[in-house]
Image (cartoon, rainbow, N blue to C red):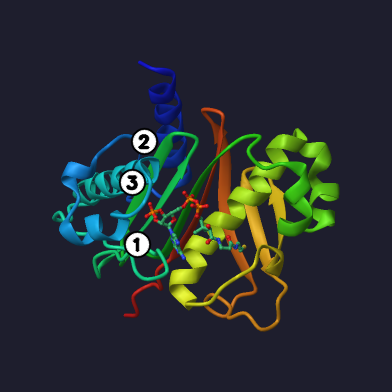
Amino acid sequence: MSDAEARAAAVQTCLRGLLPEDVAALCVPVRDASRALYPEERAAIARAVPHRQDEFSTGRMLARQALARIGHPPAAIPADDRRRPVWPADVVGSISHSSGLCAAAVAPGGRLRGLGLDIERIGAVPDEIMAAISHPEEIARHRATMPEALLRTVLFSAREAIYKAYNPLTGSYLDHRDVVLSLGGTAFSARIVAGDRPRLGGADRIDGVFAEAGGMVVSVVAVPAPSPTR
Ligand SMILES: CC(C)(COP(=O)(O)OP(=O)(O)OC[C@H]1O[C@@H](n2cnc3c(N)ncnc32)[C@H](O)[C@@H]1OP(=O)(O)O)[C@@H](O)C(=O)NCCC(=O)NCCS
């Protein structure tokens, strides 16, 4: 097993532990999976550089494998004009790539209303950008709990997972500094501090979980579907 395969296996195991049992999640090293793309997917990525094409095609391949695991037939997952994956109507999902790995997760729409997934290499987030993507109190409050390179990566990765769940549900942009994050164990909770941003289900907070595996931070936001009324 190559180093990349070992890291991917660690991330996949971690992801499955973070997500509800009936959510399918996979992670593999990025490869050329373009032969399995649907025409509308191929069109979305035709002009990108080869590495970006590989990231995209690996994500689509994994997403279809994950669809199969939840009993869904194969389907095209095109990208909309803002790069968001267009999932089949009865499914929610999320894709992430970083440092040569790609991960995808999908869930039946009756189980989750929204899903955001992010993987990020620990150390990939330099100190110089922290002022633009976080609040000083987040670093101050959590500095004693983990090494700073890990903390920076968590503060960044959690926000990406939040955005991937939040944006498709609300249609609204959310800036990194529109939320303040609190960490506790493997949980994170984001308080929306920008007064003009829509809330998810009326709540001021968006909750998620994170963990470290294969040299990466793995972050997940799973927004539950409303319980069926009797
Ligand atoms: C989209 C974004 C969240 C992550 O993109 P990235 O840096 O390339 O990182 P990743 O590889 O982890 O994720 C890319 C994947 O996210 C998915 N994606 C892109 N835009 C998305 C959106 N608006 N909503 C949900 N998923 C999205 C796509 O599947 C994409 O992969 P693909 O193009 O191969 O299909 C980021 O670039 C972005 O646009 N951020 C906006 C601001 C923000 O993050 N705010 C945080 C607020 S708390």
Residue sitting at the far bottom: 196
Q: Quadrant of residue 197?
A: bottom right
Camera-side mark, 3 or 1 = 3
* Rendered residue at 24%/65% (across/down): 88
Q: Earlier in the sequence, mark 3 or mark 1?
A: 3
Query: Which label number is shown at residue 49?
Result: none
Q: Quadrant location of the C terminus?
A: bottom left
Given residues 93 and 76, the one toward you in this image is 76
Q: Amino acid at mark 3?
A: Gln
Mark 3 → mark 2, Cα distance in angstroms: 10 Å
Mark 1 vs ligand 1: CB below 8 Å: yes
Label 2, on which residue?
Answer: 30
Q: Earlier in the sequence, mark 1 or mark 2?
A: 2
Q: Earlier in the sequence, mark 3 or mark 2?
A: 2
How packed mark 3 is, by other alpha carbons closer than 10 Å (few <14, some 14-19, many 20 or more), is: many
Mark 2 vs ligand 1: CB below 8 Å: no
Image position of 148 with respect to 56: above or below: above
Where's residue 117, x and y in %? 47, 51
Label 3, on which residue?
Answer: 53
Query: Which label number is shown at residue 85?
Result: 1
